[in-house]
Image (cartoon, rainbow, N blue to C red):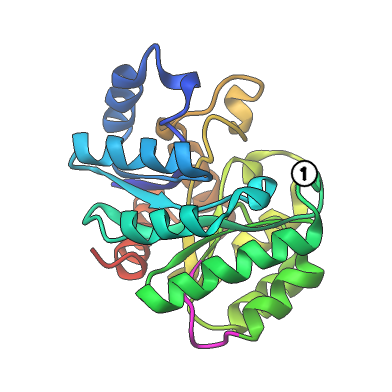
Amino acid sequence: MLIDSHAHIQLSQFDRDRDAVLKRAHEASVSDILVIGFDMKTSLGAVELAEEHTHIYATVGMHPHDAKDLTPDVLKAFRELAAHPKVIALGEMGLDYYRNLSPRPVQKEAFEKQLDLAEEMQMPIIIHNRDAYIDILPILEARHGKIRGVLHCFTGDVELMHRSLAIGNLHIGIGGIVTYPNAKDVQAVVREVPADKLLIETDCPWLTPQFRRGKRNEPAYVHAVAEKIAELRGTTIEAIGETTTRNFHELFAH
């Protein structure tokens, strides 16, 4: 069995065929899906889906692109939503210095506030990090031992992977990028990451694996991610499924 630890199937890209998408995921041995919120609307959508399906769980949080929208009222709403039994993590939260759709100081403030909430509620976090290691790692290192979660869509090199894991209680989320021929850094990370720190994801509808690149991604395609990881680590897809499923349940104890 496989678990897609990062999906956005609450989005409009899935409105026409969401039931068929879920059916294909089941047929591809995807046992559970974690639907990630990244603003108020998508967080509410994630919770709604989780309420409708036993094998779907939700997160709530504010993406760095929309950091300016993290008002006290929104943060209060996230705190209330986080108490829902199907909400098992906060995020995605973090920093994005690639697009800079919110000013960097505003991104950092929103990230810190959500980290405070995660500490308060003792919940794991989903971390978005794009071209922001220079700031995101010091912020996380300052909370050594106080947080746990996953660095989603990890694209750093082996050195950054080791520095990230040294913070403690963080996992490395690997998605479709690992299947791209030029993704040498990510492939090197996959070979070296400790087995108990590995998670698999799609980030659908984006980052579709190589075999369907250019098309909409969906949870069933996490099978291609696990297959590539198994190849790189010299093991079987069954072993990767077993390991990452265990890691998921241990991190997001629910």
Q: Which quadrant: the C terminus?
A: bottom left
136 displayed left or right of 63: right
**Which residue is disc 1 drawn over?**
101
Q: Nearer the viewer, residue 225 or 98?
A: 98
Question: How far from the left and from the top, in percent, is residue 110?
Answer: 63, 62
Residue 193 location, quadrant? bottom right
Residue found farthest to the top: 16
35 displayed left or right of 201: left
Question: How far from the left and from the top, in percent, is residue 177?
Answer: 65, 43
120 displayed left or right of 97: left
Magenta-drawn stretch, dominant element (helix, strand or loop)? loop
Q: In this view, does 147 lie above or below 224?
A: below
Q: Dot 1 lies on which element?
A: loop
| Residue drawn at 47 percent across, 64 percent down | 125
Q: How many labels does the image show?
A: 1
Q: Nearer the viewer, residue 107 or 161?
A: 107
Residue 156 visible? The answer is no
Residue 222 location, quadrant? top left
Residue 235 part of the magenta-drawn span: no
Question: How far from the left and from the top, in percent, is residue 21?
Answer: 36, 22
| Residue drawn at 60 percent across, 60 percent down | 190
Magenta region:
143-149
Q: Nearer the viewer, residue 81 or 248?
A: 81
Residue 115 visible? The answer is yes
| Residue drawn at 30 percent across, 27 percent down | 22
Question: How far from the left and from the top, in percent, is residue 157?
Answer: 75, 64
205 displayed left or right of 128: left
Residue 145 part of the magenta-drawn span: yes
Q: Is residue 190 above or below residue 183?
A: below
| Residue type pointed to by label 1 | Leu
Residue found farthest to the front: 73
Residue 119 location, quadrant? bottom left
